[in-house]
Image (cartoon, rainbow, N blue to C red):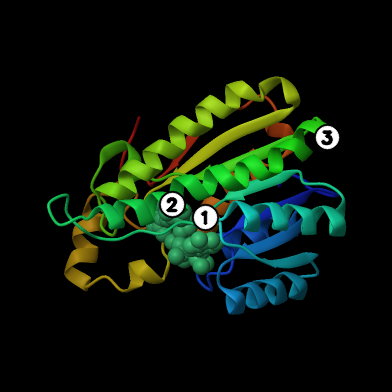
């Protein structure tokens, strides 16, 4: 795979024990990057740091609330004082909620957008100055298949809308920083084999799998490997792109 030696990568939401973020952190660390494990979940941070160190990687745990500008700026300060640079930001922290438009409240949509879109904006804005000075950066954000086709087993309309907003925001930013050596891309996973998937009743799981040509949910490693590529120097001419990782369940 692509080498990320001497690169410094922040992965938000990487404290979830069985989540996509932890696999992303482990994958980037395996490729040689120092990884920043940034999450609102303190215990989860410690577990992921331990997991990275167990494979011989370098990790820094930082408590982060992506919805707070102060928290994002403080994280950047910590990372710079520890490593002196920031090469890669993976905006992975996200929340969802199953609800219909009729039932959804303004508080519901505000909460989901606060993390999935406004939090992503705040984290991204906090790293931009450093990446611009370096004339190098890779920003990769987690969108979702539900941004493109609506629906989704676990997410509501606010989740789909927030993940669609991530796509538009990223394309706009990709143009803004294209001449600063910074690329901005998204991945749009379909259903991934995380805890939430395992909680699905068997009949519902079968119905979902029937709609996936590959015939199974995706693995966190399949998302992380795509991100490792987008985070590499080799992906330098890819920007403003979004890559579907969904087993064929939606084809653009
Ligand atoms: N699991 C899937 O099938 C799937 C599919 C498509 C897209 N995604 C996206 O991938 C990303 C990861 O999904 P996952 O299933 O691993 O989720 P997860 O719930 O396992 O992990 C999300 C992490 O984000 C953290 N987080 C939540 N709010 C935060 C905040 N305010 N500040 C900092 N951290 C915060 C949580 O503590 C958690 O560790 C999300 O953006 C999700 O929308 C997931």
Task: Find residue 29 and name its label.
Answer: none
Please identify the quadrant where the C terminus is shown: top left
Question: For this rendering, which residue is in front, 150 or 79?
Answer: 79
Q: Does the residue labelled 1 lie within 8 Å of ligand 1?
A: yes
Determine which residue is flagged by label 2. Answer: 114
Task: Find residue 134 and name its label.
Answer: 3
Residues under labels 3 and 1: Cα distance? 26 Å
Secondary structure category for the residue under label 1: loop
| Residue 64: image location, x then y, percent | 61, 63
| 82 in relation to 145, above or below | below
**Label 3, residues with CA under 10 Å away: few <14, some 14-19, many ≥20:** some
Q: For residue 57, which quarter of the picture? A: bottom right
Secondary structure category for the residue under label 2: helix
| 200 in relation to 188, above or below | below
* Residue 192 appears in the figure: no
Q: Quick one: which residue is furthest to the front in this view?
A: 70
Q: Is mark 2 within 8 Å of ligand 1?
A: yes
Work out whether mark 3 precedes mark 1 in sequence or the reverse, and give the earlier one: 1
């Amino acid at each position: 795979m692509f080498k990320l030696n001497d690169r410094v990568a922040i992965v938000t939401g990487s404290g979830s024990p069985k989540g996509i973020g932890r696999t992303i952190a482990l994958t980037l660390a395996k490729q040689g990057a120092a990884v920043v494990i940034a999450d609102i979940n303190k215990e989860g941070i410690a577990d992921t740091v331990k997991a990275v160190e167990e494979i011989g990687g370098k990790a820094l745990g930082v408590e982060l609330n992506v919805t707070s500008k102060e928290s994002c700026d403080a994280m950047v300060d910590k990372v710079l004082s520890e490593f002196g640079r920031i090469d890669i930001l993976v905006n992975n922290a996200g929340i969802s909620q199953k609800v219909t438009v009729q039932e959804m409240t303004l508080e519901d949509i505000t909460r989901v957008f606060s993390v999935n879109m406004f939090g992503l904006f705040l984290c991204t804005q906090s790293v931009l100055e450093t990446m611009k000075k370096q004339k190098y950066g890779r920003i990769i954000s987690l969108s979702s298949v539900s941004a493109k086709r609506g629906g989704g087993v676990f997410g509501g309309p606010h989740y789909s809308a927030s993940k669609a907003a991530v796509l538009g925001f990223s394309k706009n930013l990709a143009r803004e920083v294209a001449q600063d050596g910074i690329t901005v891309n998204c991945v749009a996973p379909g259903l991934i084999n995380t805890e939430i998937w395992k909680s699905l009743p068997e009949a519902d799981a079968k119905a979902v799998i029937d709609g996936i040509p590959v015939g199974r949910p995706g693995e966190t490693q399949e998302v992380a490997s795509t991100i490792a590529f987008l985070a590499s120097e080799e992906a330098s001419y890819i920007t403003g792109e979004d890559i579907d990782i969904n087993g064929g369940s939606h084809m653009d």
